[in-house]
Amino acid sequence: MQYEQVQSAWVLLYPEGMVKLNDSSAEILRRCNGERSIDAMVADLEILFNAKGIAPQVRELLHEGMRRGWIV
């Protein structure tokens, strides 16, 4: 994952291509470090976005990332 100045966005690079991430997806994936639990990431994101009840969306993105091989 890296920030692309030309696109003014975070992108996820993988062998088959590139995915341009929206701000919330980038914030979720930036927290995937193998040490934080999903609950800890959700708590942090709820503070960042001043939102409650976002766990289902966070889990959905993480599940999709694992399905596609972006997260191992």
Image (cartoon, helix red, strand yellow):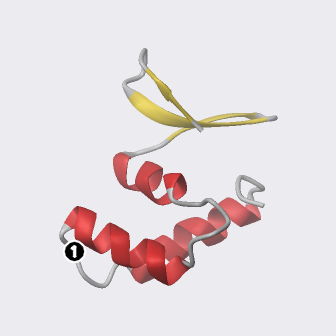
Residue 28 higher or lower than 42, as above or below: above
Residue picked out by circle 1: 51
- Residue 45, how many percent across, how many down? 34, 68
Q: Quadrant of the N terminus?
A: top right
Hey, which residue is sitting farthest right in the picture? Answer: 15
Residue 53 higher or lower than 10, as above or below: below
Quarter assignment of residue 32: bottom right
Q: How many residues crowd around disc 1 within 10 Å: few (fewer than 14), some, or many (20 or more)? A: few
Quarter assignment of residue 52: bottom left
Hey, which residue is sitting farthest left in the picture? Answer: 50
Residue, x 37% and y 25% (percent of image)? Answer: 8
Residue 54 higher or lower than 70, as above or below: below
Q: Does dot 1 land on a helix, a strand or a loop? A: loop
In terms of depth relative to the viewer, which is nearer, 71 or 64?
71
Task: Identify the amino acid type marked 1.
Answer: Ala
Quarter assignment of residue 65: bottom right
Residue, x 57% and y 78% (percent of image)? Answer: 37
Residue, x 74% and y 57% (percent of image)? Answer: 68
- Residue 44, how many percent across, how many down? 35, 70
Q: Image check: 24 left or right of 18?
A: left
- Residue 47, how many percent across, how many down? 24, 70
